[in-house]
């Protein structure tokens, strides 16, 4: 759980040294908690408001007061082995509000108390069900599948997990391209009941993420069968007959419940470029990186300028002889001072040894980087400049991002038109500046502001008619995230395949979890559960896992299969679609992978995380019916 019971306290010299690296607003929260005196946050050390993505390390204090604060903290914290009892929920919110310099609504109190580990999440509390409960099969051992496995182990159910790969990790096992990482801070990118205090970077890279997931999976690894995929799942009226394909061929398994945790980012999207299959050199997707291909001395073409491109191009520039980046459309990019920073040893010692420091730091991030951005993405129907932004706050962000572009391109203004988007900020996934502008200014890197029209031999022909010779072609073209659960054949009560009911790109589910006509079949990271406005997928995963746990308890108690009512699912999706009509992604002219061919947003949620947390707090049994009734 949380770090309220920390390891042995630091020696005096180590504590003094560690305090020199402290994030002072977090330190003030620790002092208020340890002493019970909130005056630390409201008196002469009162922190300034934390703005944007800045950690506000100095709390806005002058050097003298910083020194005095560290001295006072040393006197309080030396020898402290554990924090006092957790604050009540209202005080947690009040303390964080003072630390951040803005009011946090009281509706965040309960989720913050649980996410900070001040108490165990409600879905992990309660008695075990035992092995006589429903038999469960989990599909996928990425982050969601591992989380579900932990929950099922707590419930002492008879369960198994099947994973098509040879190890856990899902997308973080598969995406090993140079520079692969996440745009969520490390201390937020972990489960509330499985923290990792010793991250080496503020924003982790793939090797450290996969290490975390492997460590987190260790207690449930015995339940996972690797190298095994689901061919089909058919509801028999009382249970699911599942056909699995593994190293030794196919087998059938009968279970009471199937939980799909396959996620949305497991099928690389390969664009239909004429002539691509005839390219004579190595051509591969970032999610299938060819580590056997030596880029030294090669002319490398990279198709796309999304998140993976923005991470990989700065890594290979300077190694390859040249890098040519083919950009179909520019992206809005935000600066972030922490994105490339390593966490120094002083901060890691605070995280590991000072009771409460990691918890309070995480909770500050939870507010800064989750729902705080949501109003910026809501359309104002009376806003007079819809061609450039969607509300006054969104326009302020546009000016801030534009100023960052201008500062980065000083002396290279010829690149400005190519990199500056002509649509409102957040209309597509926002990206973090990973030395991108520095990279595209290099003499051995060329940004081509045109999509790829065709490949002719080793020549890439762009839509503006230019020709570019390359030796290696990298497809940074994202994923087929809307084609969910493909290629599995799942058939429910009616026998009509789920793939046929959803079509190729219009998946729908109640809360993203339950689908009418499919009893005892639940999803984690299903339709409309991806996050577009910020926040950690781990928070969302825990909410969905908790909801499924509630359904399993209901199944165990009443022994009747559960199927969400069609009208309930339809009403939820109507509310969801109406909410999306107020969001940036449905603004006129927006094109994003979030939307299907008909323009409906399929992958992403319109809700704040706190809204979804309350929606999934516990299942309403009136929303479900026994199968067949």
Image: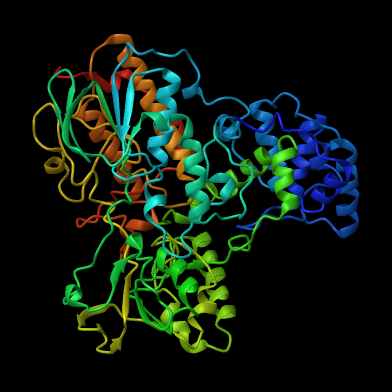
Q: Relative to 577, say whether 303 is above or below.
A: below
Q: Relative to 65, say whether 97 is above or below.
A: above
Left or right relative to 135: residue 457: left
> Which of 482/443 is in front?
443
* Quarter of the figure that contains the C terminus: top left
Q: Position of residue 456 (x, y in %)?
A: 19, 84
Dividing the picture into quarters, in which one does residue 386 lie?
Answer: bottom left
Q: Position of residue 369 (x, y in %)?
A: 55, 50
> Which of 490/175 is in front?
175
| Identity of the residue furthest to the front in this view | 248
Q: Position of residue 301 (x, y in %)?
A: 34, 78
**In this rendering, does residue 232 appear at all?**
no
**In this rendering, does residue 115 appear at all?**
yes
Q: Residue at x 70, y 28 (%)?
A: 5
Colour scheme: rainbow
Left or right relative to 276: residue 382: right
Q: Position of residue 208 (x, y in %)?
A: 53, 51
Left or right relative to 270: residue 201: right
> Which of 345/461 is in front?
345
């Amino acid at each position: 759980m949380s770090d309220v019971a920390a390891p042995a306290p630091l020696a005096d010299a180590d504590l003094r040294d560690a305090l020199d690296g402290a994030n002072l607003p977090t330190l003030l929260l620790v002092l208020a908690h340890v002493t019970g005196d909130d005056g630390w946050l409201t008196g002469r050390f009162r922190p300034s408001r934390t703005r944007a993505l800045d950690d506000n390390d100095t709390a806005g204090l002058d050097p003298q007061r910083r020194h005095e604060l560290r001295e006072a903290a040393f006197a309080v914290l030396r020898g402290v082995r554990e924090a006092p009892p957790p604050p009540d929920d209202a005080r947690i919110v009040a303390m964080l509000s003072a630390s951040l310099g803005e009011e946090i609504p009281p509706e965040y109190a309960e989720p913050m108390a649980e996410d900070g580990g001040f108490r165990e999440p409600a879905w992990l509390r309660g008695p075990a069900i035992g092995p006589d409960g429903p038999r469960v099969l989990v599909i996928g051992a990425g982050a969601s599948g591992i989380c579900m496995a932990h929950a099922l182990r707590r419930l002492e159910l008879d369960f198994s997990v099947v994973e098509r790969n040879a190890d856990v990790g899902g997308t973080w096992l598969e995406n090993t391209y140079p520079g692969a990482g996440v745009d969520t801070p490390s201390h937020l990118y972990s489960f509330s009941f499985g923290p990792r205090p010793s991250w080496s970077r503020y924003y982790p890279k793939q090797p450290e993420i996969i290490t975390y997931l492997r460590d987190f999976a260790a207690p449930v690894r015995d339940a996972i069968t690797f190298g095994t995929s689901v061919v089909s799942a058919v509801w028999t009226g009382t249970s699911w007959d599942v056909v699995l394909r593994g190293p030794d061929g196919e087998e059938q398994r009968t279970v009471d419940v199937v939980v799909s945790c396959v996620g949305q980012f497991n099928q690389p999207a390969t664009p239909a470029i004429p002539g691509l299959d005839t390219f004579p050199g190595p051509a591969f997707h970032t999610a299938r990186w060819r580590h056997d291909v030596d880029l030294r001395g090669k002319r490398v073409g990279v198709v796309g300028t999304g998140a993976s491109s923005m991470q990989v191009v700065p890594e290979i520039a300077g190694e390859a002889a040249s890098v040519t980046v083919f950009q179909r459309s520019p992206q809005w990019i935000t600066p972030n001072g922490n994105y490339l920073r390593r966490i120094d040893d002083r901060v890691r010692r605070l995280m590991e040894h000072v009771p409460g420091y990691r918890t309070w730091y995480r909770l500050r991030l939870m507010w800064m980087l989750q729902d705080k951005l949501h109003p910026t993405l809501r359309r104002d129907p009376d806003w007079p400049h819809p061609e450039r932004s969607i509300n006054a706050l969104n326009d302020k962000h546009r000016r801030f991002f534009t100023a960052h572009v201008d500062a980065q391109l000083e002396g290279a203004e010829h690149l400005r038109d190519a990199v500056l988007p002509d649509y409102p900020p957040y209309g597509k996934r926002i990206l973090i500046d990973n030395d991108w502008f520095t990279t595209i200014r290099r003499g051995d890197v060329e940004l081509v502001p045109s999509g790829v029209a065709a490949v002719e031999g080793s020549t890439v022909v762009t839509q503006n008619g230019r020709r570019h010779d390359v030796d290696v072609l990298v497809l940074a073209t994202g994923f087929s995230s809307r084609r969910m659960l493909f290629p599995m054949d799942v058939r429910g009560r009616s026998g009509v395949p789920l793939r046929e009911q959803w079509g190729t790109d219009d998946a729908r589910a109640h809360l993203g979890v339950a689908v009418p006509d499919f009893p005892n079949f639940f999803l984690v990271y299903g339709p409309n559960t991806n996050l577009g406005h910020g926040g950690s997928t781990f928070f969302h995963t825990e909410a969905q896992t908790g909801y499924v746990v509630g359904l399993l308890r209901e199944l165990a108690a009443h022994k009747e299969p559960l199927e969400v009512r069609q009208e309930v699912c339809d009403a939820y999706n109507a509310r969801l679609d109406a909410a999306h009509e107020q969001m940036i992604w449905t603004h006129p002219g927006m094109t994003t992978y979030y939307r299907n061919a008909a323009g409906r947003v399929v992958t992403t949620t319109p809700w704040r995380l706190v809204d979804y947390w309350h929606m999934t707090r516990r299942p309403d049994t009136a929303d479900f019916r026994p199968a067949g009734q």
